[in-house]
Image (cartoon, rainbow, N blue to C red):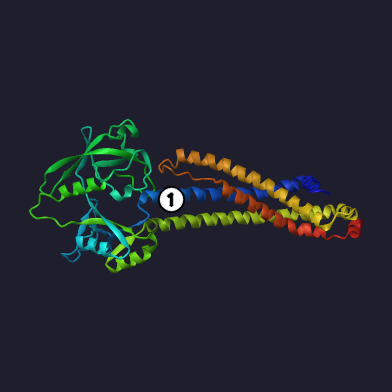
Amino acid sequence: MTWTDMVGSAVASAFRGRIRTVLTVLAVFIGALALTLTSGMGTGVNRYIDETVAAFGDTDALYVQKSQPLLELSTGTGPRAYDPEDTQVATGFGVSFAGLSEEDIAVVEDTRGVASVHPVYNVVPTYLRADGARFQLALGIPVDGEGLQLVAGATAADGADELAIPDSWVADLGFASAEDAVGEVLEVVMTNMAGAEQAFEATVSGVTQASLAGVAMNPLPSTSFNERLYAYQVSGGPEEVAATYIMARAVMEDPAQAPAVQERLEEAGMVASTVEDQLGMFRTVIDAVIWILNTCAVIALLAASLGIVNTLLMSVQERTREIGLMKALGTSGAKVFGLFSLEAVFIGLLGAVLGVTTAVVAGSWVARWLAEGFLAGLPGLSLFVFRAPGIALIAVAVLAIAFAAGTIPAVRAAGKDPITALRHE
């Protein structure tokens, strides 16, 4: 008996007990379907998180803030003792931060492992003027411009008076499309400490797409334009105002040294976090959910393997005399083992192909449907993303489980004595 004959015989034997085989294939199909869908969901969600991390900031930098207090509500808490060395940054939304002073920036610059420091000013514009209309304006942090997802144009370039505006602002500001908005001029109106207003023209450099991190939900100025606005904001007072920074971006000499640099800054009374630190817990929760779902799918596949064992054991029982005849005609025990193992693999192959194909087709359709409906508020999120290596790995895993499940019946068939088998009723 050649291998071709064995494959043909295994396929034919699989359909002798048609209902039993169909039910077993259905069990394998459910396991493969569930495993492919959960794997695709994990890939889709983690890809979205990776893109969100890219929009959150520079992965080679630490974002430094004051540790005491990191965030303080201006209402609903008791009074704090006055500290002339303390620097407070009011955001205008009932929240104030302990800002960084010039001395803090100097400490960060002198910290071992830090290559450069870029302090970020807290700028509170009075309003934004576009086409004669006024809009409330809260500027995003310029450092968040790196890795942004853009609908059109580019991020605001340092050295130019530019703004990147959110996609959701385009129509309200009077532009026909994101492409039409790029290159247009807006006015950011500031009020200084003397109460005098001044308009600063800014060119729209690009249109950003909102992300889960929310960093692209406000206009993002260039670093130099942000500094120019801050300079006017603190001008006009009777005395010079000490510089106060909402945070600082510290670029490390080696990103691998991040934990050591964080520890040094913490000893200096500051908190430093990487982009991964800021979204690490979110990613951990997503991975945990995906692992739980994958575990459920693997349990379903293991249950399906019991169905394969049962199907083949029944087949061995029903074909005992046939096995005895084959061995009496010279078929070796190894070929009998191979015959039943091929039957198990064939059942697994049917379930895997049907399950994986259905999962890819249905998952892709559901992902598009959700992206245009319930998940339209999360642009860029595709709930299911299927990659060929992952799908191939799932198919191989299902076949391996099917082969393992067929081992017991195959060994039992291969070990039968031909005389005893021929006498079997």
The one of 255 and 41 positioned closer to us in this rendering: 255
Q: Residue 200, how many percent across, how many down?
A: 19, 40
Q: Position of residue 308 (x, y in %)?
A: 72, 53
Query: How many numbered callouts?
Result: 1
Left or right? Give the position of 120 relative to 351.
left
Q: Is residue 328 visible?
A: yes
Q: Work out whether residue 69 can be spotted.
A: no
**Residue in the picture at 54% in, 57% down:** 292
The picture places residue 304, in percent across and down from the top left corner, at 67, 53
Q: Is residue 324 above or below residue 132?
A: below
At a point 19% along the width and 44% down the height, the residue shown is: 126
Query: Which amino acid type corresponds to the residue marked 1 in the rendered image?
Result: Asp
Q: Along the horizontal axis of the image, is 212 left or right of 161?
A: right
Among all residues in the image, which is located at the extreme top?
Answer: 176
Q: Residues within 10 Å of mark 1 (few under 14, many from 20)?
A: some
Q: Which residue is mark 1?
A: 50
